[in-house]
Image (cartoon, rainbow, N blue to C red):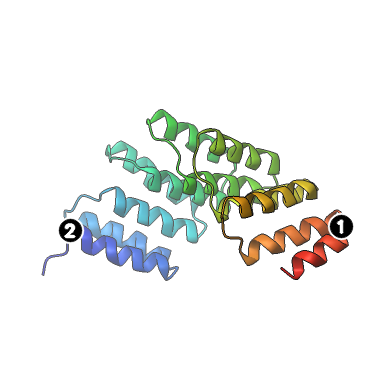
Amino acid sequence: LEPTNVTYTAVASACTQASKWTWATELLAGFRSAELRPDVVMYSTCVQALEQGGRWVEALDVFATMQSERCDLDAVAFGALISAFGSAGPWQFVILVLDDMRQSALEPTASVYNAAAAALERSDLWARALAQLVDMSRRSVQADTITYNIAINAWQKGHFWERVLELLAEMTFGLVQASVVTYSAAIGACGRGQQWPTALALLDT
């Protein structure tokens, strides 16, 4: 049975889920030796694997190859690269990739915005992270639980516990399911603001 694009991509995806990023990159090399042309799904899977390994330089190389081979880049590919920068790379690249995505006539999805905002928030650039989420709302991209978690973490770092409570109310009104992460961040924000009764009330939620 001859291997196909689907076969290689499925195995690479399994390697990514198992955090075996080196195996995924070896598969990409095997892809070429089998005289198969990697598509955007295979490349994106490889970038995701490299992101898990904290190998943002290699992830950027793979993405550059996608561009040079004129693959039909999609939101998943851009989101994978942003996540790679967010886990280990320079935060400035996150902004550049977002700009590149828009120049490619692609609109960022919720997943892409979440990846960008999370990368900036992890770099303690909470105001820049919130700016991405404001842009997300302005473009009518539907926020999800992950979006709110990032926003709450960002406001917590800015010591704006009142805004955190507003976001919790907004989640309830918009029927967005709060998670343990949501409440943990909210409790942390109230603790920083010395709002102990509110923090205890959230603990009982």
User: Residue at position x 44%, y 57% from top?
Assistant: 50
The reply to whether dot 2 and dot 1 touch (C-beta < 8 Å) is no
Residue 83 drawn at (x, y percent): 50, 51
Looking at the image, is 61 positioned above or below residue 198?
above
Report the residue marked by disc 1: 195
Q: Judge left or right: residue 96 versus residue 28.
A: right
The amino acid on which the numbered mark 2 sits, given as a three-letter code, is Ala
Query: Dividing the picture into quarters, in which one does residue 181 lie?
Result: bottom right
Quadrant of the drawing holding the N terminus: bottom left
- SS of the residue at dot 2? loop
The answer for how far apart the CA atoms under marks 2 and 1 are is: 62 Å
Q: Given the image, on which type of amino acid does mark 1 rest?
A: Gln
Q: Where is residue 179 in the image (x, y as percent from the top left)?
A: 61, 64
The extreme front residue here reads 173
Rendered residue at 29%/67% (across/down): 11
Query: Which of the numbered marks, if any, corresponds to residue 62?
Result: none
Answer with mark 2 or mark 1, whichever residue precedes in sequence.
Answer: 2
Instruction: Name the residue at 21% across, 57% down.
Output: 5
The disc at residue 34 is: 2
Task: Please indicate whether residue 12 sits to the left or right of residue 33 in the image.
Answer: right
Taking the image as shown, residue 94 lies to the left or right of residue 38, namely: right
Pinpoint residue 172: horizontal percent, then vertical percent: 63, 55
Q: Residue at x 17, y 58 (%)?
A: 34
Residue 138 higher or lower than 82, as above or below: above
Closer-to-camera residue (91/57): 91
Residue neighbourhood size for the residue with mark 2, other residues' Cα within 10 Å, grouped as few (<14), some (14–19), many (≥20): few
Kindly give the residue lying farthest to the left in the view shown.
1
**Label 1 neighbour load within 10 Å: few <14, some 14-19, many 20+:** some
Spot occupied by residue 114 in the image (x, y as percentages of width and height):
54, 48
Secondary element type, mark 1: loop
- Number of callouts in the render? 2
- Location of the C terminus (image quadrant): bottom right
